[in-house]
Image (cartoon, rainbow, N blue to C red):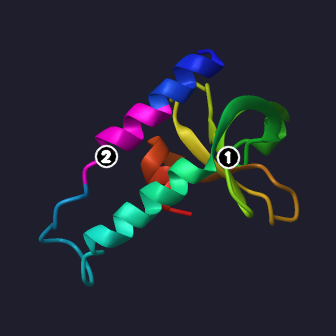
Amino acid sequence: MNAESLARLVWEEIEGFQIPEESPQQLGSPLPPEWYARQLVEMRAALVEPYTVEMLDGRRPHEGVRPVWVVAQDAHILLAYDPDPEGDFVLIFMSAPQPGLSPVRGDAVGSFIAR
């Protein structure tokens, strides 16, 4: 994966995002569509030209650092693509005592709004 194809993948995920439907197993009240719309605006504003950084994987700290592609950033988090076998997106909390790959993983939009 290169920077251009990764940027396109993230943009396509944002543009194709569908608000989750209510579920009978859902706890509490569903989030309003306006909340999701605000999250997508914030995500678009946080997008950066993808670049690589070396990070520890919180799931496997004994393996040392490895490269991930940062695709979005705001004041507190980085959203990165992890090219490990799962090929998912992951949050990096910059306020952590030692920033590294968090266990918050999934698609680009879902990971970003989970912050």
Q: Which tag is nearer the camera, tag 2 or tag 1?
A: 2
Q: Is residue 12 within the magenta segment?
A: yes
Q: Quadrant of residue 90?
A: top right
Q: Position of residue 47 (x, y in %)?
A: 61, 43
Residue shown at the point (18%, 71%) measured from the top left: 25
Residue 17 image label:
2
Q: Secondary structure at mark 1?
A: loop
Q: Is residue 47 visible?
A: yes
How far across and how far down the image is residue 5, in percent?
A: 53, 18
Residue range corresponding to the magenta coloring: 10-18
Q: Is residue 115 above or below residue 11?
A: below
The quarter of the picture where the C terminus appears is bottom right
Where is residue 61 shown, x and y percent of the image? 79, 44
* Residue plotted at (87% across, 57% down): 98
Residue 104, horizontal then vertical, whole percent: 56, 54
Residue 85 in sight: no
Residue position for label 1: 59
Residue 24 falls in image quadrant: bottom left
